Amino acid sequence: MTADTILASLHLSIPELILAVGALALLMIGVFSGERSGPMVTGLAIAVLAVAGLWIIFVPGEGLAYGGAYLADGFSRFMKIVALVGSIVTMFMSMGQAREQQLDRFEFPVLLLLATLGILLMISAHDLISLYLSLELQSLALYVVAAINRDNLKSTEAGLKYFVLGALSSGMLLYGMSLVYGFTGHTTFDAIATALSAETRSLGLVFGLVFVLAGLAFKISAVPFHMWTPDVYEGAPTPVTAFFAAAPKVAAMAILTRIVITAFHPVLADWQQIIVFISIASMVLGSFAAIGQRNFKRLMAYSSIGHMGYALVGLAAGTKTGVSGVMLYMVIYMVMTLGTFAIIMAMRRKDGRQVENVDDLAGLSTTNPFMAVVLTALMFSLAGIPPLAGFFGKYFVFVAAIQAHLYALAVIGVLSSVVGAYSRSCGLTKPRTNSPARLVRCAWSSASRACSWSATSSSAALSAVLPIWLPRRCFDGV
């Protein structure tokens, strides 16, 4: 790859360059301005993310860049916009609780910018090497963000667990990539697909495929690689947990979709079995394990595990309809999850501390009926109750599975949805009898109000528009 090739490729990666230059500039501003520059750096970081998103929307570009390692197409643009929206909303929510959560330091928004840079690069990755490098860029920033509250024992423990298990998954992913390269002789996705179509698959390639899928399954917290999720969600600061549940999941699901549909499509029968297994395991465990959870962040962790299983139902179909279902599902999941976290971050207990347990919600319908209605709507949407947006997300992934003759997977998904609906409703309707109505006030800041209103209105818009528009716009990039 010559210098001319690199220069010709720069225009396709302008959004990533905006984030990289912006992160370095904000780091210098924070260093020379001191510790009190946190709010200013956060505001500038949101502006940088917004500029990158607007560039993607209004200056679209398509094609391969950097010798085939980077791909810009409709699919990557859509998923990048979704990830950027998740990052912006998360950073916006953190502004109202920066001091309380000890996030009022300039390093926090810079780390989120770097993590988002890795997310965008991972979504456009079209080569095993670029995939690994972008994944590590994202992961290294997230390891630090998880443990950014150094004075909190749970936060430190969360960062350490995430780092150790993340390093294990990175090793598995790299080992799988080396096997795939060894048995195909290529690292770009198109070349791998061509090699697999021209020759019979070998046992070593199957092992490489398993390890690659295992490494990516860790990033979406799919069973049996979900062990880190409940502890990290509980221990990390709430804005960080909201970020973990949004943008990184979108990016990981996007690259998982890209690699199985593009690179490994000739061996669909092999990876389909793996996807079906982890989908069923994630749906079942996420639904049943959430029933006994009293900590709200652990409840959302198991909810995230279950929802990744539902998204994988569409991916298991291996069709464009399934990919459209995955895209729709991830958008709805992210909106509902961020809306739920916005509501939780807006509430306070009588002693002024943040709500952490489901029992703290006792009496919410009396003290703040509007917030109770919004939270109930978000929970029902996550459970897939019609006519809310979550129902349409599950509907389209189940339709894709049925069209692909995966009847057992669709039936198990529907049954798991019933259990998931119970786990989300029982915690809100049946608080423990010894839990008084502790919620007496609401920290209804402008940021929290805007986020909750946005989540509710976005849910209504998604219910009306996306189920009609998105399935007709199957992007050719996948």
Image: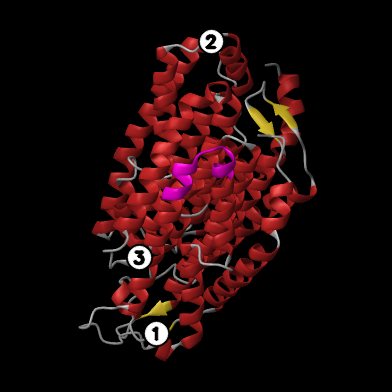
Tell me which label, 2 or 1, sits earlier in the chain. Answer: 2
Estimate the x, y position of residue 360 in percent, counting from the top left: 31, 78
Q: Residues within 10 Å of mark 1 (few under 14, many from 20)?
A: many
- Distance in Å between CA atoms under marks 1 and 3: 18 Å
- 399 to 69, vertically: above or below: below
Label 1 secondary element:
helix
Specify whether residue 12 is painted magenta: no
Comparing 145 with 454, the one in front is: 454
Element class at badge 3: helix
Q: Amino acid at mark 1?
A: Leu
Q: Nearer the viewer, residue 288 or 412?
A: 412
Quadrant of the image occupied by residue 344: bottom left
Main SS category, magenta section: helix
Q: CA distance from mark 3 to mark 2?
A: 48 Å
Q: Which residue is mark 2?
A: 185
Q: Residue furthest bottom?
A: 366
Q: How many marks?
A: 3
Q: Which of marks 3 and 1 precedes in the sequence?
A: 1
Q: Nearer the viewer, mark 3 or mark 2?
A: 3
Does label 3 or label 2 sit earlier along the sequence? 2
Residue 364's disc number:
1
Q: Amino acid at mark 3?
A: Ser
Residue 440, horizontal then vertical, whole percent? 36, 89
- Report the magenta residues as a range: 400-412
Coloration mode = secondary structure
| Mark 2, secondary structure of its residue | loop
Which quadrant does the C terminus fall into? top right
